[in-house]
Structures are given as structure tokens and as C-alpha cells.
Image (cartoon, rainbow, N blue to C red):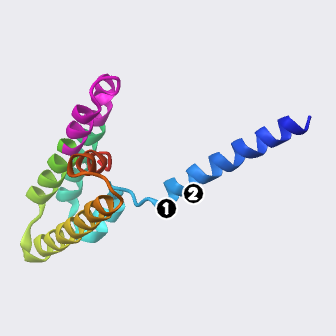
Amino acid sequence: MMKYVLVALCCTLSVLGLQAQRLSTPELYPSRSELVAQYQLDEVQQLELNRIIDQREANLESLGQFTNQDAETYWTKRRSIYYGELTSIRLILEGPEQLAAFDEQRVADRIAESERVRELMEQGHGRSAAKILMLERY
């Protein structure tokens, strides 16, 4: 009986640990409302944003066929979807304020990414291993 209690306790702690890790990891894709607020999008831009988000979701769903194949191919395709979405969002922005906000966010993202690569390298991962670990971010 005690064995079952210990197994249940270990499983519960594992699930809580994974949940805490998931909660501490920032979302890569900001929500629609966050993007609207960040870039102060007008109604036409919001319609285009909806189309971009729908396209991203469809692209991510189509990746299901690659999950059992080469991991690097899968994560490279995920990264392509991410950068394609960024490009599409940049194209719908108008005016210097929106473009400046976008560029500032991209700079912050690049700095965070380079810091993460540096951390991975310091942890003893080689450059190629760090690259694959970074691909998993997308």
C-alpha cells in the first residue's frame, strides 16, 4: 500500500514540476489582443492579423506529419512558420510608431535569443546542439 502512495506522490510532483516549467516559459506567440495593443492596430489591420494567425495555426497543424521524422526538419519548419508570421505582421504595419514598436520588439527578441545560446554553450552544449535546442523554441 505504501508503495502505491509513493508512486502516486512521485507522479503528482512530476506533473506539478512540468506544469511549473511550462508556466515559467514565456509564450513565443503573443495573443491577438497583445499584438493589437502593442502595435495599436486599426480595424483593417486587425482583420489582416486574424488572417495571419489563422494561417499560422493551419501551418502548425500541417506539421503533424513531420513529428515522427527528423527532429531538426520539424523544428526548422516551425522556425520558418514563426519568421513567416513576423514578416507578415511587419507588412501590415503602417506609420513610424508601429514600425518602431515592431523593430524594438525584434531587437529584444534577438538579445534574448543570443543570451539563451550563450547559456547553452556555457552549459557545455556544442554549437550544433545549441542550435537544435534553440530551434525547439519555435
Tell me: 14 left or right of 133.
right
The kind of residue tagged 2 is Ala
Identity of the residue drawn at 32% across and 58% down: 120
Q: Main secondary structure of the magenta part?
A: helix
Residue on which the image places disc 1: 24
Depth check: 138 or 101 in front?
A: 138
Horizontal and vertical percent for residue 7?
Answer: 77, 38
The kind of residue tagged 1 is Ser
- The reply to whether dot 2 and dot 1 touch (C-beta < 8 Å) is yes
Horizontal and vertical percent for residue 69?
Answer: 29, 23
Tell me: 103 left or right of 57.
left
Identity of the residue drawn at 26% across and 60% down: 117
Residue on which the image places disc 2: 20
Which portion, as a residue range, is magenta? 58-79
Depth check: 16 or 59 in front?
A: 16
Query: Tag 2's secondary structure?
Result: helix
State the CA–CA distance, disc 2 to disc 1: 6 Å
Depth check: 132 or 126 in front?
A: 126
Residue 38 counted in the magenta span: no
